[in-house]
Image (cartoon, grey):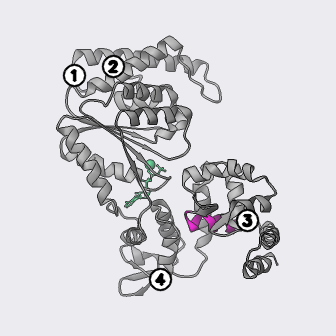
């Protein structure tokens, strides 16, 4: 009866009124002539791009031109991000600037296009498996200068919005352009809106963020949705109220809209939705959770195998755990565990509460736990029982691990 809740539907932006207001204000000040930089940071799937989509619509409504580029490491080329924003998708083609743009700008665009096209042609000749494209230093310096001038002069024509998505994936050359721009101050007549995850954070990106901060950038941290908003999101996607069981599953997403979406999709695709009352749908059974676990585990794979493996082991200790216990459980020095887990901490998958670490999304912990090989899981519970017993944990906790070790 998976029809009970309709199919995928476009849902309005939920629970982001304050952030939208903030960004609308920034747009208004840009259309009045000021320049502004906003860094929109938040964990994977928290809704940065969804917010960007909404603000792009607002920008169009007030007549601002929007330029947008998304950093993707798989197609990283020198100046790739900036070129996509300023020259259009295919920078071997002619400049994408409006017809009749100032000839000074057209000249800069032309020189930059041909410089990058030459670099691409050379790179194609000696492209190796890692696609290491490198411009000779003098040409890179010139391209950097041109690209920065292009961004800066773009506002001479009219106010505009420059969106740079996923800055944590940007090529180093584009970051160098942004660094240079930051040192010259805000870009006149432009709202520069950059999105980024808290991790990974290269030294180059950290330098750009620091430089922009000094130049007066506003920092907007996008927090997970409230429980209320997360349930509303699921209800909007389903076109119905959610029953108790499904509500419980939605809440394990820790307010992360991507995980909420994953829960809704998993239950729908498994045909486990049932109408349980007037306009209320719920999930039945637990067969649908296997598919969800696989999706959720794939969502955290970007942290790398070392981090995921340690999180696997930590999942046995429960939603929150003491670092020293994890070290004992895994027979590693605490410092070693810390060195690995700080990446999960930076990415927002776990957070610190005193000397405890807490899984931010129970959904992630249970997905990692469920996919452990049963014999490995039992052995980990056995070791957890001994570790926690030695550490003075209550008998009931030790016993529950013993029970799961059988
Ligand atoms: N406030 C919201 N209301 C409704 N849907 C949302 C909201 N925020 C996010 N979504 C939906 O959740 C999913 C994940 O959001 P989004 O892609 O914007 O995350 P992100 O922060 O950009 O993630 P990434 O770091 O991977 O780029 C998308 O399907 C998006 O449409
Ligand atoms: Mg995004």
At a point 38% along the width and 25% down the height, the residue shown is 183
Considering only order in the chain, which callout, 2 or 1, is on the residue closer to the N terminus? 1
Q: CA distance from mark 4 to mark 3?
A: 28 Å
Residue 121 location, x and y as percent?
Answer: 51, 18
Q: Earlier in the sequence, mark 4 or mark 3?
A: 4
Residue indicated by mark 3: 372
Q: Is mark 4 within 8 Å of ligand 1?
A: no
State yes or no: Cβ of the residue under disc 2 lies below 8 Å from any atom of ligand 2.
Answer: no
The residue carrying mark 1 is: 101
* Span of residues in magenta: 360-372
Disc ID at residue 138: none
Residue bearing mark 4:
244
The reply to whether the magenta stretch includes residue 387 is: no
The residue shown at (21%, 19%) is 102
Quarter that holds the C terminus: bottom right
* Helix, strand or loop for disc 2: helix
Q: Is residue 136 visible?
A: yes
**Alpha-carbon distance for marks 3 and 2?**
54 Å
Residue at the farthest top position: 138
Q: Tags 1 and 4 in contact by the CB under 8 Å rule? A: no
Q: Secondary structure at mark 4?
A: helix
Frontmost of labels 3 and 2 is 3
Q: Which label belongs to residue 109?
A: 2
Q: Nearer the viewer, residue 78 or 276?
A: 78
Using the rendered view, name the quadrant where residue 299 is placed. bottom right
């Amino acid at each position: 009866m998976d029809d009970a809740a309709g199919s995928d539907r476009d849902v309005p932006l939920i629970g982001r009124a304050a952030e939208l207001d903030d960004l609308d204000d920034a747009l208004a000040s840009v259309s009045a002539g000021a320049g502004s930089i906003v860094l929109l940071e938040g964990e994977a799937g928290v809704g940065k791009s969804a917010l960007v989509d909404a603000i792009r619509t607002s920008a169009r409504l007030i007549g601002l031109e929007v330029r947008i580029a998304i950093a993707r490491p798989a197609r990283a080329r020198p100046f790739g991000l900036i070129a996509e924003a300023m020259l259009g998708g295919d920078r071997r083609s002619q400049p994408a600037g409006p017809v009749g743009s100032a000839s000074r700008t057209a000249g800069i665009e032309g020189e930059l296009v041909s410089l990058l096209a030459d670099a691409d042609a050379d790179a194609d000749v000696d492209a190796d498996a890692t696609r290491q494209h490198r411009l000779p230093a003098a040409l890179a310096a010139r391209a950097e200068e041109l690209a920065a001038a292009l961004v800066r002069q773009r506002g001479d024509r009219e106010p505009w919005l420059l969106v740079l998505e996923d800055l944590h994936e940007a090529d180093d050359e584009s970051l160098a352009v942004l660094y240079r721009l930051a040192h010259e101050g805000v870009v006149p007549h432009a709202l520069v809106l950059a999105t980024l995850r808290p991790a990974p954070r290269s030294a180059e990106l950290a330098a750009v963020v620091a430089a922009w901060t000094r130049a007066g950038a506003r920092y907007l941290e996008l927090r997970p949705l409230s429980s209320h908003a997360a349930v509303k999101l699921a209800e909007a996607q389903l076109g119905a109220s959610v029953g108790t069981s499904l509500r419980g599953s939605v809440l394990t997403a820790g307010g992360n809209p991507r995980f909420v979406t994953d829960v809704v999709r998993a239950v729908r695709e498994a045909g486990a939705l049932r109408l349980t009352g007037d306009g209320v749908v719920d999930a039945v059974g637990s067969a649908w959770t296997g598919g969800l676990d696989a999706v959720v585990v794939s969502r955290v794979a970007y942290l790398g195998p070392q981090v995921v493996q340690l999180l696997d082991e930590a999942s046995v200790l429960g939603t929150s755990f003491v670092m020293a216990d994890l070290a004992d459980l895994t027979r590693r020095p605490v410092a070693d565990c810390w060195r690995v887990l700080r990446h999960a901490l930076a990415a927002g998958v776990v957070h610190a509460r005193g000397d405890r670490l807490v899984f931010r999304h129970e959904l992630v912990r249970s997905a990692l736990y469920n996919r452990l090989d049963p014999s490995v899981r039992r052995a980990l519970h056995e070791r957890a029982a001994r570790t926690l017993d030695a550490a003075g944990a209550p008998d009931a906790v030790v016993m529950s691990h013993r029970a799961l070790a059988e």
